[in-house]
Image (spheres, rainbow, N blue to C red):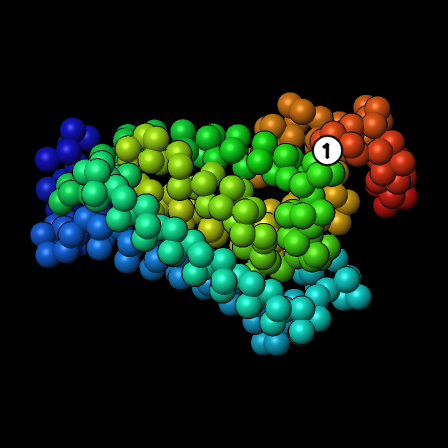
Amino acid sequence: MSSLHLPPYLSPLGMPAPLVTGWAHVTDRYSPATIEFVGTLIIQLVFFWGPSAVYLSLDTLFPKFSESHKIQPAPKQPTRSELFHCLWLVLKNQILTTALHAGMIYISTLVGKPAFRIDASIPQLHEVVRDFLISLALREALFYYSHRILHHPRLYPRIHKVHHRFTAPVALAAQYAHPIEQIVANILPISLPPQLLNSHILTFWLFMAYELLETTTVHSGYDFFLNAAKKHDLHHEKFLIYFGALGVLDWLHGTDESKLARRKAKGVVAGKGVSQEQVTAVLKESKSE
């Protein structure tokens, strides 16, 4: 029984008894390596490819609705050929991600140190909330600083410029990236924090599902969910602002739109080597809007 004294038909996460029994059956029947690999792949397929397909289908299924909610105008939207190219690169990154994950599971199995806790128990609610919030904070730091580093003039043309091909992003473009960026900025910020915390695999899957939904939504180019995509859309459009997801580090480092306009930065705002001319151009464009 959970220390939270929930009714006997509920688990610590409020899961119905059949689901708890089903999870116990899964852990009894399959190895931890199989559970981690297959379960993580399913989460990726459902919570990245699913929302991406929904957002991309709006243009075809509900064109008027789609047009009325697009943040950027039609001339800036990617062409059909660009979308197919995006799909191909994202598929290659998915294969890369899956192969790396399989390799890490193999190594962790050999050394006897699994990345996550996988057992028949269901993590308690306070543990899930704790690990989720800590992972959220760590992910923000890892993503923000890796993202800013990728904007360095020596790295941007070779790596991050691939992702910025879409000035008006679409959901699928969340993982349209150079392989190095896919590993450093997309995979590690999500997978590493729960590993450091030795979180339960169910907590990791919950966290990953949230992050995949978040990244597809902020790249969707739509004003749904209280304009969740607006800040990242501005990053793709204006380049120098909004490097994080939560906004705390953007506020702290002065890379949010309001601070950029107030400070009229002195030449280096988004990272070393950003010229004053670039900053001034962005400020003028912001004011004109």
Q: Residue at x 74, y 29 (%)?
A: 272
Instruction: Tell me where residue 130 appears, x and y as whole percent.
Output: 34, 29
The C terminus appears in which quarter of the rendering?
top right
Q: Which residue is drawn at 61% across and 76% down?
A: 60
Instruction: Tell me where residue 85 appears, x and y as whole percent.
Output: 62, 68
Q: In this view, does 184 lie to the left or right of 205?
A: right
Local crowd at mark 1 within 10 Å, few (<14), some, or many (≥20)? many
Q: What element carries label 1?
A: loop
Snapshot quadrant of residue 287: top right
Instruction: Tell me where residue 111 appears, x and y as whole percent.
Output: 21, 38
Q: Work out whether residue 51 can be spotted.
A: no
Residue type pointed to by label 1? Ala
Q: Which of 74 and 189 is in front in this view?
A: 189
Q: Is residue 214 above or below residue 142?
A: below
Q: Residue at x 10, y 35 (%)?
A: 1
Q: Nearer the viewer, residue 12 or 280?
A: 280
Q: Which residue is drawn at 56% across and 46% down?
A: 181
Instruction: Tell me where residue 189 appears, x and y as whole percent.
Output: 47, 38
Snapshot quadrant of residue 22: bottom left
Q: Work out whether residue 30 can be spotted.
A: yes
Q: In this view, does 98 lie above or below 263?
A: below
What residue is pinned by disc 1?
270
Snapshot quadrant of residue 192: top left
Q: Is residue 52 above or below residue 81?
A: above
